[in-house]
Image (tube, rainbow, N blue to C red):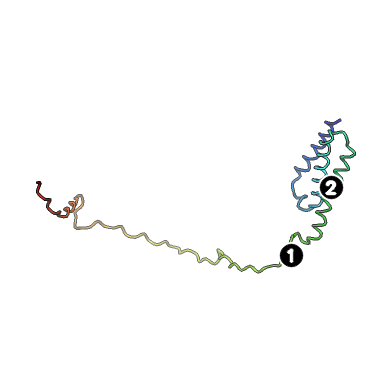
Amino acid sequence: MRTRHALRATALALIVSLSGCAFAVKQPAATAAIVGATIGFSTCEIGTDFDKHGTCALVGGGAALLLGGAVLVATLLGGDGNTILMEKDEDIRPEPPSIDDVPPPDAAPEPPPPPVEPSSATPPGTIEPAPAPPPTAPSPPPT
């Protein structure tokens, strides 16, 4: 008997969880009531060693009414979903440029720069000698 109830509860939880969150977004009060009933009933069943089903059903129903009712009242008082009063502020950021505002690229690309010719002072294949080191002061004679 217990496994049959556990299987039904598991199947119901899987069906609800696999159905997506569109329902939860559109109906937050019902979602809160379902979650409250599930948690209230489950924790009561675990706490009473699965003996008092009627009492746990009442606990789950009470949790559903409390949480669902609180969310329903908050949704009704909240208006369009905002939790605070908001005035529409003008956007002070400048509008980014559009791709239509950018001029088209030129049809012909710029030609590459001409290659650099080697200097004519040194014929190709010769190596210039290294410059001579600067003269140094003579060292004192040994004593």
Are discs 1 and 2 less than 8 Å apart at CB?
no
Residue at 80% in and 49% down: 32
Q: Type of residue at label 2?
A: Ala
Q: Nearer the viewer, residue 143 or 75?
A: 143
Residue at 61% in and 68% down: 92
Percent across and percent down for residue 103 are 50, 66
Q: Is residue 99 above or below residue 19?
A: below
When asked about the image quadrant of residue 112, the answer is bottom left
Q: Type of residue at label 1?
A: Leu
Q: On residue 137, which mark appears?
A: none
Q: Is residue 34 above or below residue 74?
A: above
- Looking at the image, residue 114 sits to the left or right of residue 41; the answer is left
Residue at 83% in and 44% down: 37
- Looking at the image, residue 142 sits to the left or right of residue 18; the answer is left
| Crowd tier of the residue under label 2, counting other residues whose Cα lies within 10 Å: few below 14, some 14–19, many 20 or above | many
Q: Nearer the viewer, residue 136 or 68?
A: 136
Question: Which secondary structure, mark 1?
Answer: loop
Provide the residue designation for mark 1: 85
Percent across and percent down for residue 69 are 84, 53
Structural distance between the alpha carbons of marks 1 and 2: 29 Å
Question: Which secondary structure, mark 2?
Answer: helix
Q: Nearer the viewer, residue 81 or 133?
A: 133
What is the residue that sits farthest to the right in this orientation?
54
Provide the residue designation for mark 2: 64
Percent across and percent down for residue 14 are 77, 39
Percent across and percent down for residue 50 are 85, 34
Q: Nearer the viewer, residue 112 or 10?
A: 10
The numbered mark, 1 or 2, whose residue comes first in the sequence reads: 2
Q: Is residue 37 above or below residue 103?
A: above
Q: Quadrant of the N terminus?
A: top right
- Looking at the image, residue 117 sits to the left or right of residue 1; the answer is left
Residue at 88% in and 37% down: 53
